[in-house]
Image (tube, rainbow, N blue to C red):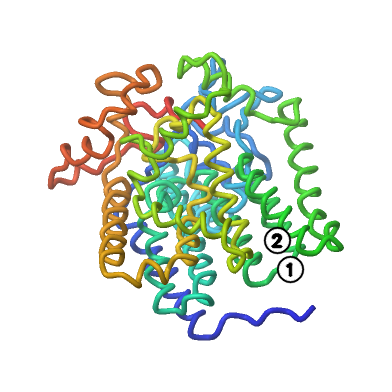
Amino acid sequence: MKRAAAPPLSTRRAGILIFIACLLLYNLNHQYRGTADTAPNVYLPISILLHGDLYLDRYPTLPGTQPGPPYPYYLQPFHGRLISSFPPTPALVALPVYLVPALWLRASHTPYTSETFYLVCVTAAKLAAAVIAAAAVVVVFLTLAPPLGVPRALPLALLFAFGTSAFPIVSQGLWSHGPAMLFLAGAAYLSLHQPQRVAALGTLLGLAVASRPPAVVPAIVFAACAAARDPRRLLQLLGAPLLIATGLAAYNYHFFGSVSGGYEQVNRAVLERQQLTALWTVNPGPALAGLLVSPSRGLLIFSPFAVAAFAGLWRTLRDPRWSEWKPVGLSVAGYLLFFSFYTGWWGGMCYGPRYLTDVSPFLVLLLVPVWQDLQAVRWRRLGFHLLVWTSIFIQTLGAMMWDGEWYIRPTHVDVDHARLWDWKDSEITRLLRNYRWSQTSSQVPAFGGPSPDQSRE
């Protein structure tokens, strides 16, 4: 089969400019806004580059590395050392960004106990997170450009960059969502524009799952659609995912003694902290409502343009002319359904619907099937623009001002779940009320605000 043509030079140049612009804007706040879930990833690249291992107990500036149990949920003991409870994929993806800082730390003999070491690690983590997010924006732009053209693809790519969780979550902390989001965006690009590259598609899907295990949902969707399109290439499609899955299972078994890895301890901590009796429920209704319209976690509250994306999702399922886009729509529907059965659907200490971050590129891609309809009628066009600017405002508010304070005051959300439905005192309204023109208004301790150990994967 003939290989698909590369994007035109003008499109590639636009992609480079988008990357640079996003990288600069993502770093305007000069703050690292990850929570405790991201803490191991801040130090892991240093261990890999300077020591050739994954141990974290050598870093006194990492909370929880003091000798002896109990250890925080994000660290687990291994033969007298400490390792991350989560997969190391985000740290591996961040290695190129950490290379120069790590070499400087070694050359300058900076002690791990110093404030300088801590600041270098946090700065490198923030830069790596911004690079990952900006790269995902470029991939979304390259996916949008063929069906819409560069002039229309550019603003929609920026909508993804600043109107979704890509801004306050992925670009601000070294979360596992970042690589998963990037790899899934790449998978969508290949599926839509270079479907013959099934081996590359399988590789990206496997890496997405290695970053975030729930990404297995869209991975299955894309793999099934690709296999249905050309069953003869099924083995080629599954080769890389099987190798990645085998490597991850071996890693988990070696360090944690089980194929599921460190999530067993993390899940136990979730149940204890959030006072839940089980991780999963047979009644998805309340969680689905929360994921969509909770004032402090709802997708349609934090990114209201997604209303149009759901119209696009419906069209991909109903209109044969958009059958090639069906994996994108099914992935969003599948992710929503998956987390609707998860009892801790609000995602711990974070800003907005964190668990849906991985498929946030698809929300913008799903605008393509309904683009003509959105632009055809004046009131639809104006209404869509209002939703777009509202989304950008809300997500920018979180990226610039989030401090985690709402999550623990006046009561802790992990215990007082009803606060997730408080319209008068939501995370958004709290940030607006707390706004003040001062440098301290945006000062957020690395690893998550007033109580970083309350975040949960």
Circle 1 sits in a helix, a strand or a loop, which is it? loop
- Amino acid bearing label 1: Arg
Circle 1 residues within 10 Å: few <14, some 14–19, many ≥20: some
Give percent across and percent down for residue 42. 50, 43
Report the front residue among 309 and 109. Answer: 309
Picture disc at residue 426: none
Rendering quarter of residue 58 = top right
Identity of the residue drawn at 43% across and 37% down = 291
The residue indicated by pointer 2 is 201
Question: On residue 197, which mark appears?
Answer: 1
**Residue 107 in picture, x, y percent from top left:** 53, 54
Q: Amino acid at mark 2?
A: Leu
Q: Quadrant of residue 425?
A: top left
Above or below: residue 411 compared with residue 106: above
The residue closer to the viewer here, 97 or 389, is 389
Which one is in front, 418 or 317? 317
Q: Position of residue 218 (x, y in %)?
A: 63, 49
The N terminus sits in image quarter: bottom right
